[in-house]
Image: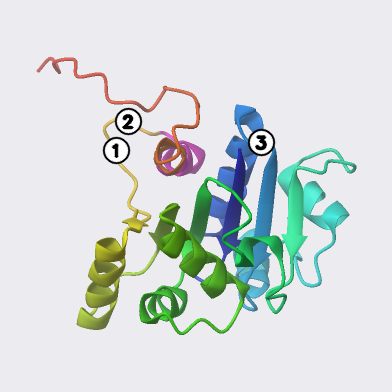
């Protein structure tokens, strides 16, 4: 399986990191096309203390804890509109934008793409491939909601970064994993079932 993953400047870089790690651990993904917006590196520095400016394969692999020579991740510059994800003839399963800023979401909803993230998302919609957008904003204003509804009508899956608590998380990592497992579910990618709802009755 080939997937595109985009990281934008919304808060929640940890969701992007963990999603990429879980995709690698699953063994179901052979290639990940990675794209980052201009502000994604700034947010990563603030939230995780990691420098992703002018990323190299080695720097990305180090951030994710992959071997230095891993070729799972193929990084594409934001301004490279000739990259593989920009063409519908490049067969892939779909795309994940995690986290997804409201600016990126609005640009995709308008169809007026100006960079590779917008174009790659538009390609997924026009080709009928899965597009999963993970917004991390609160509260939503009417424009945000209208854009999300428009994208839902166009075939995108809106998966807000809203963690559940029924698995009784004890750490931030468990909260993050629960949401990232839901992202993988959209592509039927195997993962741990430790946060899965069991349907068992809860004793009082």
Percent across and percent down for residue 179 are: 41, 43
Q: Nearer the viewer, mark 1 or mark 3?
A: 3
Classify mark 2: residues with Cα within 10 Å, few (<14), some (14-19) or many (20+). few
Mark 1 and 2 residues: CB-CB less than 8 Å, in contact? yes
SS at circle 1: loop
Residue 174 highlighted magenta (yes or no):
yes
- Residue 54 part of the magenta-drawn span: no
135 over 169 or under it: above or below: below
Between 185 and 172, which is closer to the camera in this rendering?
185
User: Disc 3 marks which residue?
Assistant: 24
Spatial CA span between label 3 and label 2 = 26 Å
Residue 203 locus on image (x, y percent): 13, 14
The residue identified by callout 1 is 165
Q: Is residue 53 left or right of residue 13?
A: right
Depth check: give the residue in front, 140 or 74: 74
Circle nearer the N terminus (3, 2): 3
């Amino acid at each position: 399986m080939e997937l595109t993953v985009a990281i934008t400047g919304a808060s929640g870089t940890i969701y992007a990191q963990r999603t990429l790690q879980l995709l690698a651990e699953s063994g179901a993904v052979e290639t990940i096309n990675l794209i980052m917006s201009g502000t994604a590196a700034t947010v990563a520095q603030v939230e995780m203390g990691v420098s992703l400016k002018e990323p190299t394969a080695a720097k990305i692999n180090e951030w994710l804890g992959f071997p230095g020579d891993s070729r799972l991740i193929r990084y594409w510059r934001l301004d490279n509109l000739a990259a593989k994800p920009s063409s519908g003839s490049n067969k892939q399963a779909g795309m994940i934008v995690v986290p997804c800023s409201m600016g990126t979401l609005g640009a995709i909803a308008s169809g007026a793409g100006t960079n590779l993230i917008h174009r790659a998302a538009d390609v997924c919609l026009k080709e009928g491939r899965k597009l999963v957008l993970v917004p991390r904003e609160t509260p939503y204003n009417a424009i945000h909601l209208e854009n999300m509804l428009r994208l839902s009508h166009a075939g995108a899956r809106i998966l807000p970064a809203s963690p559940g608590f029924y698995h009784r998380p004890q750490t931030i990592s468990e909260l993050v994993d629960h949401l990232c497992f839901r992202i993988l579910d959209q592509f039927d990618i195997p993962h741990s079932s430790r946060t899965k709802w069991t349907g068992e009755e809860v004793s009082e």
